[in-house]
Amino acid sequence: MSRLRRRSVRPVVATALAVLVSVLVAGLVAWVPAEANGPAPAAAPGGAAYSKTKALTRVLTNADGTTYSFPTNNVTVTADQTRNLRGRQRILIEWKGAQPSGGRASNPYGENGLQQEYPVVVMQCRGVDDPSLPKAKQLRPETCWTASVAQRSQITRSESEASWVHDLNAAAADKERVSGMTPLPTAAECPTADIAPFYTRLTPFVSAKGKVHPACDADHMPPEAAVGSAFPPNEIAAFTDTSGNGSVQFEVRSDIENESLGCNDKVDCSVVVIPINGLSCDKPSTPASNADKACRKGGRFEPGSSNFSNEGVDQAVSPALWWSASNWKNRFSIPVTFGLPPGVCDVLDPRSPTGFYGSELLAQAALQWAPAYCLNKKRFKFQHNRTSDEAGFRLMESGRAPAAVVSSAHERRSEDPVGYAPTAVTGFSVGYVVDRPDNAGEFTSLRLNARLLAKLMTQSYLGSDLGRGHPGIGDNPLAIMSDPEFVRLNKGLSQNVQEVGATLLSLSESSDVVEQVTDYIAHDKAAMSFVNGKPDPWGMRVNPAYKRIKLPTSSWPLLDSYIPETENTCRQKNPAVYFTQLAAPVTTLRKIAEALLDAWPNVQTRCEYDVATDSYKLGRVDRQSYGSRFMLGIVSLGDAERFGLRSAALETKSGRYVTPTEGSIAAAVSLTDQKGKLDPFVLDQADVRRSARAYPGAMVVYTAARLRGMDEDDAKKVAQFIRVSTSEGQRQGTGNGELPEGYLPIRAKGVTAKLYDAAQRVADAVEKQTPAREPSAEPTAGASTGGGGGTVEPPAAPGAGAPSAAVPSAAPTATGPAEPVATDPTTAMSSPMAGRLMPFLLVLALLGGLVGSGIRFFVRPPRRQP
Amino acid sequence: MAGEETALTVSTAFIMLAIVCTWVVAQLLVLGGVSQDRAQALLYDDFRQQLAGATAPTGPVVPAGDPVAVVTAEGIGLEQVVVEGTASGDTLAGPGHLRNTVLPGQAGTSVLMGRSSTYGGPFGDLDELGAGDTITVVGAQGTLDFTVLGVRRAGDPQPQPLAPGAARLTLVTSEGEGRLAALQPRDVLYVDADAAKGFPAPAGRPAAVPDSEKALAYDTGAFPLLALALALLLALTLAIVAARQRWSAALVWVIASPIAIALSWATTDVVMRLLPNVI
């Protein structure tokens, strides 16, 4: 456009162009939905956002029967996504106008969040709030999930801790000394439930199958609530700031993660948000009993204060009584629906799947796409199998898979040409979970540059004092949080070193993602001079094991070999390379995303004594505690959006930091070039560095397929997949066949038009399958190109008829089959060099002999004569 | 005088060129044949022993250079021990067996590559084979007679797909055109021969072979060895010069000639690995 503008001379033309430009820009903005960094509340395409306002008032009844009302809080709750959720997906829930919280806990999840005042309880419940539905489908406190007994039931409380029996809104039966279940569990089942004069309130849990867990002690809880269960609690007692606002990323669980709760595509569930506003109390007795007084308490912590030491709180304003009628009445129930489970195709479609092998970047899209294929009888049963890009490409080349999913050009090893059809535009990001010090919440604007990534990947941080003895780098910072370069970029973070700060959780196997990460480093001068041995301005040096490592590389090696010497018996029994334990790369991006989701570093330095086997063993460190979380990992953008992970801004131009947004990815796509018409688009990181807007982690995922020699059926399937995925599959949304967040839609117009066109070209070429010239180079060698491992039959042209057709007789003889099949002609192979070698040598010998002796005969004698 | 010396140098250089070229041609056509004959004799003894001791290889993976079969074609006087591997260096000793195909005689297609004109030219007369001729293969699993389907050149249709259980032998060599055809092998020539039933073949063959083992390919891996051989020749030359200053010319030549010839021979063998494998 700037070129056009330069050409325009006259002001009128300039104005016209300016209008045109602005219209175009407006169009661009319109179709690239504004998507803020990371978990910001993008208006989720296709997902119905939720928003509701309620007036919450706490009412105390006076002794004379009159009532006193506290000022009303008008609370508005919004959620960004509610439809077609998947297990472990995180949705953003925000509220405003709530009562400010006090006594903030460092970890608000599960029972750790109980000791707070006026929090907002967010939990997942089976059923929806709809009076027209049968009771089994309705939402009740009994169908709401909590991971501990203390969050559900109040067991044998003294009178001063039994404020719920004076709840103004409670039914008479709920004000009994023991309540919550009819009939009450027997003393044999729950011995602690009914002990006079103590008060007990049970909130049983009813599982999806109808089993009732009385929740009177840990043994009577659903199995998923066991101590140390696979997933940490997801229910949260979240904090409202002093101006009444708050937000939380709530992780929903499907029946795969939590079978007792049992939410899936058929069972509707709700996310219930209960702003704790304080119990409303009934008419007190005279004189007021302890329970009456307890009910009227208003909290002992100042709004905005913290409660790190887990002191007791006033029960009437604590989250423990979320089930009480006063609190339950104040609930916002956000109905959510779940998408089809990942295995739906295997359950509903008996056809054998057609596997596409390769990049994990497509995983989240494939999850939504697969049902759109397998549930449609006119289409094939699509299956995306995650392998390394290289392995997928090899499978495709050798004909064992119809197509590969890759995100860069791969070297061909067979003769057949390969076409690359752009299928999705996405990328990687450096995901992080970092808490600000002093319980100030999560850090949301992490910035990284290539040198910091290089420092992390080359294992140049020491991790802990164990690393101090490492030859050559003993003076380096222990971890990234104490690196002055990082501190300068990210102000206001704790500089307390954790081992995990020495590492960036990455992939152990070959991947185009690693290739792109290292390519980004390779195009940064400062990063490369660091890698090549020059210390950074603060004197930090590269780990000698990685000095001058060749970049980019598709798989990152573990080169360090330093085993620390220590007095620790456990380490002496298990000598291991320390930096490798810190790095501990994993095999899939999904594992990295889940590690970030759980804030559970994969650092393998935990060393403990096992009494059972009388031995010391190494293992993964514990989950990080809330308030001091710090973890970095490479994730796919699809996973980052699905799980609500934050993505770091990466430096492009000096001083410019770009986060992955649809705009920045589109800017990167506009920088890509394509060599041949069927080739992949190459993103030159040098261009990215010049552009201030393009995101360096943008990657195009291709469906790569052979253009020759493919089975006709497979060719049709691949062509269909390319066409469907670039049309229907690019509609943004959460439903079957739609494109999830984290992917930039490929459209026929706009910046992705070139990708769309290329995809259609490749689809045509794949379907057409350049025919006939099948055994291209070597005739003998079906042998050498056919590979495959079966009997090698050079002349057996594929599609030339099955051997059974060619050989009807059960006793084949050397005279050959009865019906000869047409075979391909033998291809010419010759070596001119071989042909000319001996004549050339003979001529040379003759020439040498003649000239040599000629000189002796004719040249020397004349010289002698004079 | 200077001009005279120059002329002498130039003349010597040309003579040396002539000697080197003649030596290479001689090695290719004559001396190579002698060494191949000897290699065959040794391989034959070795393989006979292995057959008798039932230790002959049946695949799927055989160390390169080991004998794997004896192939005989009465019509053209061919009787050769087949070695494993088809790189240039392997086919110096005899016809080589392409390593990703079944062994000769086993069910499936087995590909043998042999030289047509150099190093004894064991496959030099392949083009004289005609349909119906018999090729006999003796391997670890027994003796099998193949019936020749015909000679195949570029453009000819490939043979019919193989029936299950049948065995096929594809012999590969090169041939030239016109006068002096034997001296300019250029194009690949195939002879296919079928047998109704082959011996069972074990699974697990390599899926592919390096490029250096395909027809008309050469082995660039020989360069380091060539450098070593040439360095030895250079060292010998310097040694001769040094020796000439102390001993008489006759004495030096008597001692140095055998070494020079042996070294040249070895060097040329290395050079051969840099030339196509079926010429």
Image: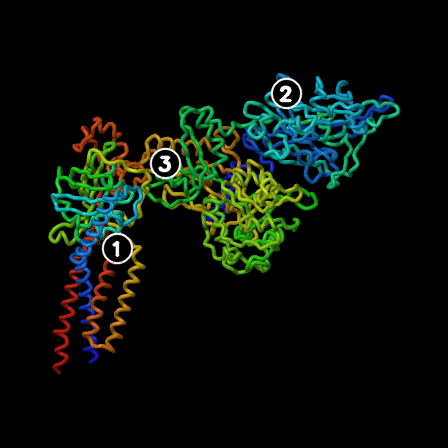
Name the residue at 68% across, 23% down. A214
State the residue position of label 1: B273
Q: Viewed as shown, does residue A282 lie left or right of A404?
A: right
Q: Can residue A715 be seen at all in this image of the molecule? A: yes
Image coloring type: rainbow
State the residue position of label 2: A138
Which of these two is toward me, A436 or A211? A211
Check disc 2: other Cα within 10 Å, few if <14, some if 14-19, many if 20+: some
Hey, what amino acid is under mark 1? Arg
Q: Chain of mark 1?
A: B
Classify residue A43 by image quadrant.
top right
State the residue position of label 3: A400
Q: Position of residue A314 (x, y in %)?
A: 78, 33
Q: Position of residue A270 (x, y in %)?
A: 62, 26
**Quadrant of the frame with the C terminus of chain A:** bottom left
Q: Is residue B118 above or below residue A855?
A: above
